[in-house]
């Protein structure tokens, strides 16, 4: 069987750059070189594209990949039929690419920007199209779509960064009138819990708004939901399927960036410690949300299940979830009978199935 040529994109100009490097290391180590010609292309924080010609993918998380001697500057051409371009002095090398796997998280990676470039190029790619990527990345737009679909979620308010400069006290008064403490404060357009805070007082809230404003001009403030944190992996195009449910015990105030990637305080339970009837409701809701947003390929959908009455409440959706060795998306499908390597095969197949 003819090998597929696969370009794996990683890094990116995003606060989640380091998470992407870890995800890409795992993806590349689990891609079968007997099936694929692999072209790893890293994007630096400064926006340079480099074709990484090494095969020691452990160099990615440390950043050593950037200075590998055989690297070449590279780009995916928006001109159809050009594929992957790399540059050797004044010479341009063109490589046909059958499918792109953008292992990119956050801004310029999963928000529709990269998807737009790949759409122009005509190269099939893993994941959702431009519109679904943009809606899922902006949590306030996600909230509007999910509200319209009648799916239960936390009450929320939108705060704009400009209001913090001109009328901070009025913003704080408005939020305190709407919500009780604690509140959750999030940048509208980041993942991996970057810039997310739990505010237990007015001064906490002030600091949390300013912290979120570093990352986005739109800030989401949500009511606190007292519940278990439940995650579901979804995969597919026209007929998506949901994995079994997993549960996160953060071991901290909440499941923040440190708990996800740096400390070892968090514990994952697969399957989740909830009744089977509740788990089925969560899985059904995950597929509904996936379809109403218009996702393709993959997403991880996060919920709370309330302690008081076992009620599922939607939290957020991630269209390019983490693929590190400890990430829930691959672990959930592994527990559902699809091991990591097979999962990659299926995502690449789904990418080539979609008309672009």
Image: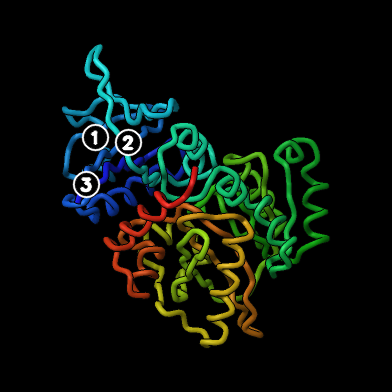
Q: Distance between the residues labelled 1 and 2?
A: 7 Å
Ranked by sequence position, the earlier of labels 3 and 2 is: 3
Disc 3 or disc 2, which is closer to the eye? Answer: 3
Between 181 and 63, the one nearer to me in the picture: 63
Ranked by sequence position, the earlier of labels 1 and 2 is: 2
Extreme residue toward the top, this view: 90
Return the residue at label 1.
52
| Mark 1 vs 2: CB contact within 8 A | yes
Quarter occupied by residue 59: top left
**Left or right of 37 in this view: 43:** right
Circle number at residue 346: none
Residue 356 in the image: above or below residue 282: above
**Left or right of 160 in this view: 199:** left
Return the residue at label 2.
42
Quarter occupied by residue 63: top left
Disc 1 or disc 3, which is closer to the eye? Answer: 3
Q: Position of residue 123 (x, y in %)?
A: 40, 38
**Residue at 37% over, 75% down:** 336
**Residue at 77% over, 51% down:** 172
Q: How far apart are marks 1 and 3 (CA)?
A: 20 Å
Q: Dot 2: within a 10 Å radius of its alpha carbon, few (fewer than 14), some, or many (20 or more) residues?
A: many
Return the residue at label 3.
3
- Secondary structure beneath dot 2 equals strand
Q: Can residue 194 be seen in this view?
A: no
**Residue at 33% over, 41% down:** 98
**Residue at 26% over, 38% down:** 39
Q: Can residue 88 be seen in this view?
A: yes
**Left or right of 84 in this view: 200:** right
How is the model colour-coded?
rainbow
Q: Where is residue 270 in the image (x, y as percent from the top left)?
A: 40, 77
Q: Dot 3: within a 10 Å radius of its alpha carbon, few (fewer than 14), some, or many (20 or more) residues?
A: few
């Amino acid at each position: 069987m003819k090998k597929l040529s696969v370009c794996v994109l990683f890094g990116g100009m995003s606060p989640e750059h380091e998470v992407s490097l870890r995800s890409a290391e795992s993806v590349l180590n689990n891609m079968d070189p007997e099936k694929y010609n692999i072209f790893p292309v890293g994007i630096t924080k400064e926006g340079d594209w480099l074709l990484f010609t090494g095969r020691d993918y452990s160099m990615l998380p440390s950043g050593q990949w950037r200075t590998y001697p055989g690297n070449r500057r590279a780009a995916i051409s928006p001109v159809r039929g050009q594929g992957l371009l790399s540059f050797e002095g004044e010479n341009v090398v063109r490589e046909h690419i059958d499918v792109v796997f953008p292992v990119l998280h956050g801004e310029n990676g999963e928000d529709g920007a990269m998807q737009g470039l790949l759409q122009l190029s005509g190269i099939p790619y893993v994941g959702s199209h431009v519109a679904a990527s943009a809606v899922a990345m902006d949590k306030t737009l996600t909230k509007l779509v999910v509200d319209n679909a009648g799916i239960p979620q936390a009450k929320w308010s939108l705060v704009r960064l400009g209001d913090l400069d001109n009328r901070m006290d009025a913003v704080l008064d408005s939020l305190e009138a709407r919500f009780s403490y604690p509140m959750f404060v999030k940048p509208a357009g980041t993942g991996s819990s970057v810039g997310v805070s739990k505010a237990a007082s007015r001064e906490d809230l002030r600091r949390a708004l300013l912290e979120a404003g570093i990352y986005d001009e739109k800030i989401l403030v949500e009511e606190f939901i007292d519940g278990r944190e439940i995650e579901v992996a979804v995969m597919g195009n026209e007929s998506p399927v949901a994995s079994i449910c997993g549960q996160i015990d953060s071991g901290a105030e909440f499941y923040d960036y440190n708990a996800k990637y740096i400390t070892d305080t968090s514990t994952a339970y697969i399957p989740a410690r909830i009744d089977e009837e509740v788990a089925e409701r969560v899985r059904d809701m995950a597929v509904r949300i996936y379809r109403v947003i218009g996702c393709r390929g993959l997403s991880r959908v996060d919920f709370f299940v309330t302690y008081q009455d076992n009620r599922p409440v939607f939290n957020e959706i991630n269209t390019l979830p983490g693929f590190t060795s400890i990430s829930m998306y691959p672990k959930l499908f592994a527990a559902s009978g699809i091991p990591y390597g097979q999962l990659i095969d299926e995502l690449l197949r789904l990418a080539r199935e979609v008309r672009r």
